[in-house]
Image (cartoon, rainbow, N blue to C red):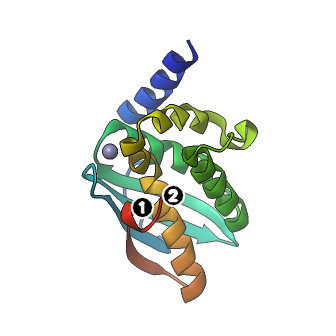
Amino acid sequence: MLEELYREIILDHYQHPRNRGRLDGAEIKIEGANPSCGDEISLYARLRDGRIEDVRFEGHGCSISQASASMMTQQMKGKTLPEARALIGDFKGMMRGQAPHEEALGDLIALQGVRKFPVRIKCATLSWVALERGLDDYESAGGAVEGTATTEDNL
Ligand code: ZN
């Protein structure tokens, strides 16, 4: 029953993606790719006063990659950069097999079933790897960045 609920959450985000589209004036633009499945994500984030004011994505690929990006953007809006990094750590930890922090992850828990299919884990982490790369680049550059990220660099 729980697996069915999780499938419905993933399908809903795939069919009705949240925060889809370009974002003008974004401080972070990252082109993310998952070569093992062919998934691609363009991730945009606008940062103000140490928070993620807005975050959007465009892309194509399998349902897991696109649903995960939709769910990620939904949870990231309004987060401070340390909060965003903590959530990235929690999500990647869950995908590596650690017990999930259910309160922090919310609906993202629906993606834990993907762990049973190791080849799909990179589909789920693609948008997260892209955001993490963007935050790293932004903080080391001290300003707006454009870059690329692939799941081959990271989990
Ligand atoms: Zn995929």
Q: Residue furthest bottom?
A: 141
Which of the two discs, 2 and 1, labels the residue nearer the N terminus? 1
Q: Position of residue 74 (x, y in %)?
A: 56, 45
Which quadrant does the N terminus fall into?
top right
Residue 121 visible here: yes
The residue indicated by pointer 1 is: 43
- The 10 Å Cα crowd at callout 1, few under 14, some 14 to 19, many 20 or more, is many
**Residue drawn 34% across the image and 54% down it:** 58
Disc 2 secondary structure class: strand
* Amino acid at circle 2: Val
- The 10 Å Cα crowd at callout 2, few under 14, some 14 to 19, many 20 or more, is many
Residue 54 horizontal side relative to residue 152, left or right: right
Disc 1 secondary structure class: strand
Q: Nearer the viewer, residue 106 or 56?
A: 106
Ligand 1 picture quarter? top left
Give the number of the mark in front: 2 or 1: 1
* Amino acid at circle 1: Leu
The residue indicated by pointer 2 is: 55
Residue 1 horizontal side relative to residue 149, left or right: right
Q: Nearer the viewer, residue 51 or 112?
A: 112
Q: Are marks 2 and 1 in contact (CB under 8 Å)?
A: yes
**Residue drawn 61% across the image and 61% down it:** 53
Q: Position of residue 84 (x, y in %)?
A: 65, 60
**Residue drawn 41% across the image and 36% down it:** 117
User: How far apart are the alpha carbons under marks 2 and 1?
Assistant: 7 Å
